[in-house]
Image (tube, rainbow, N blue to C red):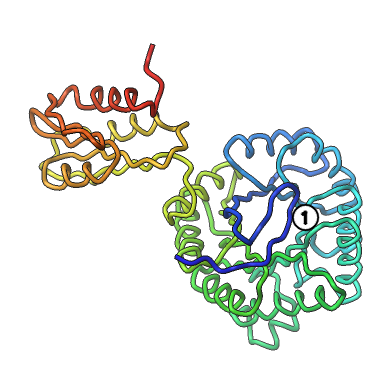
Amino acid sequence: MARRKAKPVRVGSLTLGGQAPIYIQSMTNTDTRDVAATVAQILELEAAGCEIVRCSVYDEACANAIGAIKAAIHIPLVADIHFNAALAVAAVENGVDKLRINPGNIGSRARVERVAHAARAHGVPIRVGVNSGSLSREMLERYGGPTAEALAQSALEEVAVLESVGFEDIVVAIKSTGVQQTVEANRKLAASCGYPIHLGVTESGTVGYGSIKSAVGIGTLLMEGIGDTVRVSLSGSPVPEVPAAQQILQACGLRVFCPEIISCPTCGRCGIDVEAMAGEVARRVRHVTRPLKIAVMGCVVNGPGEAREADFGLAGGKEYGMVFSRGKTPRKVARDRLLEELVRELEEAGVIEPRS
């Protein structure tokens, strides 16, 4: 796919847009005033692969905690601001790497201009973040509800205010609880502005269904070339948001975080425990970041063909199966040795370290 070309915007040590990778974000759910708890959660997110993190700034103590939090973490820190422009200014003055403001509740044009002047003075970009649940009353009345048109127009009008005072270090996000509305609104946004777009389906739910909703919404837009950074919003701990986002990006062919395990859904012809073998292979290669495909197939119908298209693989049988490694002749192997022989191929190829 051809990615939409967005204006590069610097966020801490990273660049959004341009030719930069699509970065993964998450958000803390700790009390931001509790520096130790917030830092601990961010470090956990970092370990999972989070690349930009956001925290709520809802009072002066939160804003004052920004400096201590930032000093203890290793990824850019974003301040999430609602209702209070003064807190946005305070977060900037305390060293935050990016602001998120919501045009539905940040207040008057004068307040937005005040935030823009402070951000420009400190070289801090602003994300205009529009949510279907917090559109302004004026937008709701103009469009008859939180429609895709209302969401896109809310974002574009706030962008215009920032541009009117010469501020252009802008990232834009439009999120809805509905997948179709999220996709439609972001298509309209992408066609109307050249700034980086942050993707997400807001309040998508718990890990199971929320991940699926996010994959459909975010994945659809990514496959159309739209999006420069993503967050999968899930209820509970934010840590599972990160692997969910990684899996979406990898499934779309945009980034590689681990080898792809190709395994069949199994049927009555299956001669091996595909689920257990695929799980064990995934465990063995979980720290590998090379772009590899490893196939674990249950029988000889699609198994040999699928496995041959992979870099490594096995295809099961009732008594014997086949082990494949790119560039080598497939080997016939007893069924109870298939996994062991596949692991040996991975070791000999230097994909994983030999077992001691």
| Left or right, 270 with reference to 87 | left
> Quadrant of the rendered structure where residue 102 is?
bottom right
The residue lying at 80 percent from left, 75 percent from top is: 163
Question: Which amino acid type is marked by label 1?
Answer: Lys
| Left or right, 233 with reference to 342 | right
The residue lying at 76 percent from left, 75 percent from top is: 158
Q: Position of residue 16 (x, y in %)?
A: 66, 57
Residue 272 appears in the figure: no
Residue 123 against residue 244 in the figure, above or below: below
Nearest the eye: 149 or 355: 355
Residue that sits furthest to the top in the current view: 356
Q: Residues within 10 Å of mark 1 (few under 14, many from 20)?
A: many
Nearest the eye: 181 or 278: 278
Residue 54 against residue 114 in the figure, above or below: above
The residue lying at 63 percent from left, 80 percent from top is: 192
> Quadrant of the rendered structure where residue 230 is?
bottom right
Screen quadrant of the C terminus: top left
SS class, disc 1? strand
> Quadrant of the rendered structure where residue 238 is?
top right
Q: Position of residue 178 (x, y in %)?
A: 53, 69
Residue that sits furthest to the front in the current view: 327
Residue 115 appears in the figure: yes
Residue tagged 1: 98
Q: Position of residue 329 (x, y in %)?
A: 16, 33
The residue lying at 65 percent from left, 66 percent from top is: 173
Residue that sits furthest to the left in the current view: 319
